[in-house]
Amino acid sequence: MNFLSAEAAGAGAGSTSMLLMLALMFAVFYFFFIRPENKKKKTVEEMRNSLSVGDEITTIGAMTGKIVQVTEDTVTFETGEDRVRIQIKKWGVSTTAKMEAAEAEARAAKSRGRKK
């Protein structure tokens, strides 16, 4: 009888460590994959909601231009000197010039910090 109780106690400890490992793996996935992706989505959504006339943009198709009109879900922008106007959905805007400048400055500050 004593043998059976020792075996049952060992099985309980194994399942507890297995649950602990699964929880640890989920935490690692959350903090290294899910959370940064959600932050990035939130930043891009805020950028798209704050678009205004005169902003320089780059689309997901790599077209660049200056915004001339913004509606609730579309953006109209002009490309180059020929002033061709193109209308796209807001989700098609990849970056703005302000956003690219801020990212470049953050990278430069980070690299300066490493050199010290």
Image: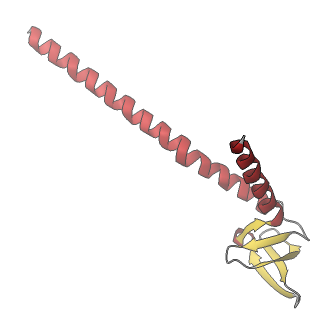
Residue at the (73%, 58%) spot, across then down: 45
Q: Residue furthest bottom?
A: 82
Q: Which of 64 and 23 is in front in this view?
A: 64
- Report x, y in % for residue 100: 77, 62
Position of 26 relative to 70 (above/below): above
- Report x, y in % for residue 89: 73, 74
Tell me where residue 44 sits by quadrant.
bottom right
Q: Is residue 29 left or right of residue 95?
A: left
Residue at the (81%, 68%) spot, across then down: 72
Position of 52 relative to 43 (above/below): below
Tell me where residue 9 sits by quadrant.
top left
Residue at the (72%, 47%) spot, across then down: 110
Q: Is residue 1 visible?
A: yes
Tell me where residue 57 sits by quadrant.
bottom right
Q: In this view, does 7 lie to the left or right of 56?
A: left
Q: In this view, does 94 lie to the left or right of 66?
A: left
Q: Quadrant of the N terminus?
A: top left
Position of 109 relative to 27 (above/below): below
Q: In this view, does 18 lie to the left or right of 2?
A: right
Q: Nearer the viewer, residue 39 or 82?
A: 82
- Report x, y in % for residue 36: 61, 48
- Report x, y in % for residue 111: 71, 49
Q: Which of 82 and 5 is in front in this view?
A: 82
Q: Is residue 49 visible?
A: no
Position of 6 relative to 110 (above/below): above
Q: Residue furthest top?
A: 2
Q: In which quarter of the image is the C terminus?
A: top right
Give the colour scheme shown.
secondary structure
Residue at the (84%, 85%) spot, across then down: 85
